[in-house]
Image (cartoon, grey):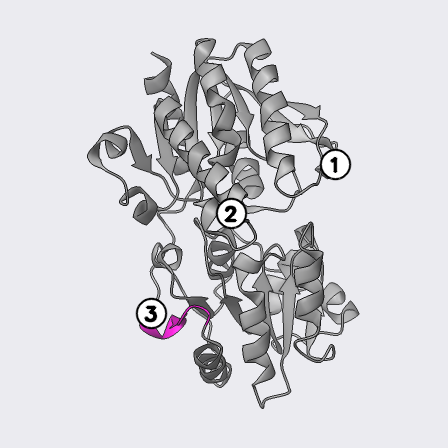
């Protein structure tokens, strides 16, 4: 079975939840599958190869709003040329041109990661285009995978009949005893709060920085591990909210560096205003970190305690609960058996088999 994949910037080692989802999922498929993954050239820096996966690196821009449309259009044309049995589209924006795929007799599977039009970074025109693209995606897809079951429940029976809930997964962690990286950026093991994510407004880092600035305990530092792409003005705003001595912006990190950050953090905070299914939260939980998360539907997809939540966007509530969490050093054990990538792969392959015939 040949499957074309579009809607991701690519993998491996490319920042983003969709990118990590694809990086963990597709290499697990057995050899009867052939995947063609369309990547965006400006983001590709790795030459790593995978069995059964062919990369086609296409031209792209990094212009916010135009990047996805441009890449999705040329990826759609290439998918028609490849003649796969199935085209798997990740997220609603890249599905704008899916009627072309159906016109040429191709089956479409959609993975709905998040309602992007809820993100503050988009203006009026972009939000309405994304809503239109959502309608197009729903009407043209043979099957729809929601990574967030609460998002699926918003829609009627007709859509639910051709959709299912399959969560994101996680890989088993390999905690690091090394500290050379964190020490090189001025951190002390067990004396920092960690947040991971791309620097964009929907991640709520402004709320986190303001809350952290209110803490009287100066023994801890805040680490924000994530790259800046188009939101440079938001990043510059963040840098003015707190003393540079109390916060570390690492930029995008992966591999051993990210492993060390997770392994030696005291607390993990997810301050997002919107999420589909936060892979980074699963990662933090897999390391046994104590967590503090915004009270949004996506963070209720995992089993947490009431004291692990703070009111979304509420600086005072977040600051108060940060203080409470940092006063107690604890290693957590979570039930994460539902988030197995191999199990997820089998569920997706079953959908492929059903859609194909």
**Of callouts 1 and 3, which one flags the residue occurring earlier in the amino acid sequence?**
1
User: What element does badge 2 sit on?
Assistant: helix
Checking the image for residue 124, the label placed there is 2
Query: What residue does disc 1 label?
Result: 42
Q: Given the current orientation, which residue lies at the most extreme right position? A: 184
Residue 52 in sight here: no
Tell me, yes or no, whether the highlighted magenta stretch contains residue 63: no
Q: Residue at x 58, y 11 (%)?
A: 82
Of residues 213 and 25, the one nearer the viewer is: 213
Q: Is residue 88 above or below residue 204?
A: above
Q: Given the current orientation, which residue lies at the most extreme front position? A: 124
* Label 3 crowd bin: few (<14), some (14–19), many (20+), radius 10 Å: few
| Percent of width and height locating residue 342 | 43, 36
**Of callouts 2 and 1, which one flags the residue occurring earlier in the amino acid sequence?**
1
Asked whether disc 3 touches disc 2, contact meaning CB atoms under 8 Å apart, the reply is no
| Percent of width and height locating residue 93 | 51, 35
Q: Residue at x 46, y 61 (%)?
A: 273
| Percent of width and height locating residue 242 | 67, 78
Q: Is residue 65 left or right of residue 344?
A: right
Residue 231 in sight here: yes
């Amino acid at each position: 079975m040949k499957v074309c994949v579009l809607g991701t910037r690519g993998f491996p080692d490319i920042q983003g939840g969709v990118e990590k989802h694809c990086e963990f999922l597709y290499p697990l498929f057995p050899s009867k599958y052939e995947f063609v993954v369309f990547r965006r050239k400006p983001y590709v820096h790795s030459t790593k190869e995978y069995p059964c996966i062919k990369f086609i690196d296409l031209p792209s821009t990094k212009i916010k709003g135009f990047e996805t449309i441009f890449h999705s259009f040329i990826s759609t044309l290439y998918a028609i040329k490849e003649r796969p049995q199935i085209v798997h589209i990740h997220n609603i924006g890249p599905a704008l041109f899916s009627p072309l795929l159906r016109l040429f007799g191709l089956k479409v599977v959609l993975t709905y990661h998040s309602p992007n039009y809820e993100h503050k970074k988009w203006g009026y025109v972009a939000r309405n285009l994304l809503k239109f693209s959502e309608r197009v995606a729903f009407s043209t897809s043979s099957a729809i995978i929601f990574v967030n079951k609460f998002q699926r429940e918003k829609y009627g029976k007709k859509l639910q009949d051709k959709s299912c809930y399959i969560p994101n997964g996680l890989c088993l962690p390999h905690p690091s005893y090394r500290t050379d990286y964190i020490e090189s950026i001025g951190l002390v093991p067990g004396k920092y709060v960690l947040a991971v994510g791309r620097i964009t407004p929907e991640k709520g880092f402004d709320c986190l920085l303001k809350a952290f600035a209110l803490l009287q305990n100066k023994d801890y530092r805040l680490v924000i591990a994530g790259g800046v792409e188009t939101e440079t003005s938001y990043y510059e705003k963040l840098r003015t909210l707190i003393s540079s001595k109390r916060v570390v912006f690492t930029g995008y990190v992966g591999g051993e560096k990210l492993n060390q950050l997770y392994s030696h953090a005291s607390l993990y905070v997810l301050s997002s205003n919107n999420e589909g299914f936060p892979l980074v939260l699963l990662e933090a939980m897999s390391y046994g970190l104590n967590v503090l998360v915004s009270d949004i539907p996506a963070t209720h997809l995992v089993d947490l305690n009431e004291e692990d939540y703070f009111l979304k966007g509420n600086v005072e509530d977040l600051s108060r609960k940060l203080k409470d969490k940092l006063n107690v050093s604890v290693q957590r054990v979570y039930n994460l058996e539902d988030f197995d990538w191999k199990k997820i792969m089998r569920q997706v392959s079953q959908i492929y088999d059903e859609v194909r015939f």
